[in-house]
Amino acid sequence: MMYDYSPEDDKKLVDDYLKQKALADDEARQGRLAAGLGEAGATIGAAMSGIKVDSPFYQGLADQADKGAKEKMQVVDYLAKKDQELADRIAKKKQNEATALAEQEKLKWEKDKFNAEQSNKAQELGLKRQELAAGKESKIEEKNQTLNVPGFQLGDNVKPGITEAKDARESLATFKNVNANLDQLGQLVDKYGAFEYGGAGGAQMDSISTAIRLDLKEMAKLGVLSSTDYALLDKQLQDPSSIAALFTKGSTSKAQIDALKRNLTNKFALGMEAKGYKPDELMADQIKKNQGGMGSAIAAPQVKPAKALSDEELDAEIRALSGGK
């Protein structure tokens, strides 16, 4: 805001006022002197008999006194006017200063309000970012839990989806069942021999062999084994009531079961890797143990994930691999 005064204007006004006042005071003194002389002359003239009071000398003194009185009144009026002007200027200056101060206070209040609003917005934005970050971490954790397979870590190349993770978990459970059944079948071979037809031992061995074949087929359906893998593993599993088992030694049958277990472990590890999973340290040690020193499947070349097949598709591929039988 622009104001119509300045410190220089005030100084000039005061200097002018003082000069005029000094001049007026001097003129007033002269007027008072002339008036005094006029009054004295009039008094003397009136007192002296035979002397005309309208003498030019005394009349001049009277006129001078009258003029001095008028000039005195003019000076008084002038000084009063100047006093009022100065008072008005001072009042206006104070009013302008008060207005400027009020505007400064208003600007300060608006600035403080703006800063407070910005601070609140920054805090709200920070909270939103924290909420978004927490939500993102929660979703990542939820996704990791969805993709989690016990004993395995996510691989470096293939990124599994929810379906692959579900199939991998089911394949792991089935793989453990097959291993447990193979161990139990080996114990029965130790007890009854490779061939057992009828009786409690034969029925148990036949039931376990059937369960193993069904689990291998399930692993092929889940895509962790290919149809070729399934056909080869199924062929390795000897029927304990077959003619071939009749002429097989128990030690030979045990060796076949161990070989089946090693081959299954290797195929399973490769299938899991193809689905995007690699074994953790504990599972890697177990795989090595099951492989019997064949080497870790982790170092095996990447393979294309086996296609999940229906029962009919799997049976058709097995028949084709077996020469259409």
Image (tube, helix red, strand yellow):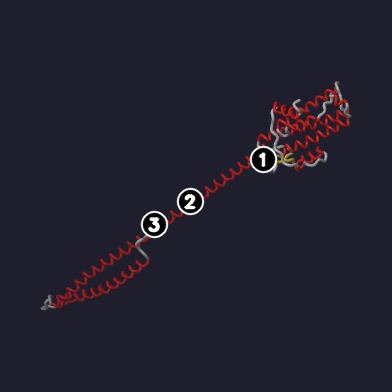
Say which residue label 1 marks.
159
Residue type, mark 1 in image: Lys
Label 3: state its secondary structure: helix
Q: List x then y, in percent, for residue 278.
A: 73, 41
Q: List x then y, in percent, for residue 305.
A: 70, 36
Distance between the alpha carbons at the discs numbered 2 and 3: 22 Å
Query: 295 or 248: which is nearer to us?
Result: 248
Distance between the alpha carbons at the discs numbered 3 and 1: 71 Å
Decide if residue 232 is on the left or right side of residue 136.
right
Q: List x then y, in percent, for residue 292.
A: 83, 39
Q: Which is more N-terminal, label 1 or label 2? A: 2
Residue 14, by quadrant, is bottom left
Q: List x then y, in percent, for residue 234.
A: 78, 29
Query: 169 or 271: which is nearer to us?
Result: 271
Q: Which is more N-terminal, label 1 or label 3? A: 3
Q: How busy is the neighbourhood of tag 3: few (under 14 within 10 Å), some, or many (20 plus)?
A: few
Q: How busy is the neighbourhood of tag 1: few (under 14 within 10 Å), some, or many (20 plus)?
A: some
Residue at 76%, 33% in the rendered image: 175
Vertical comparison of 232 with 130: above or below: above
Residue type, mark 2 in image: Phe
Say which residue label 2 marks.
114
Q: Marks 1 and 3: in contact by CB < 8 Å?
A: no
Say which residue label 3 marks.
99
Give the residue furthest to the front.
323
Residue type, mark 3 in image: Thr
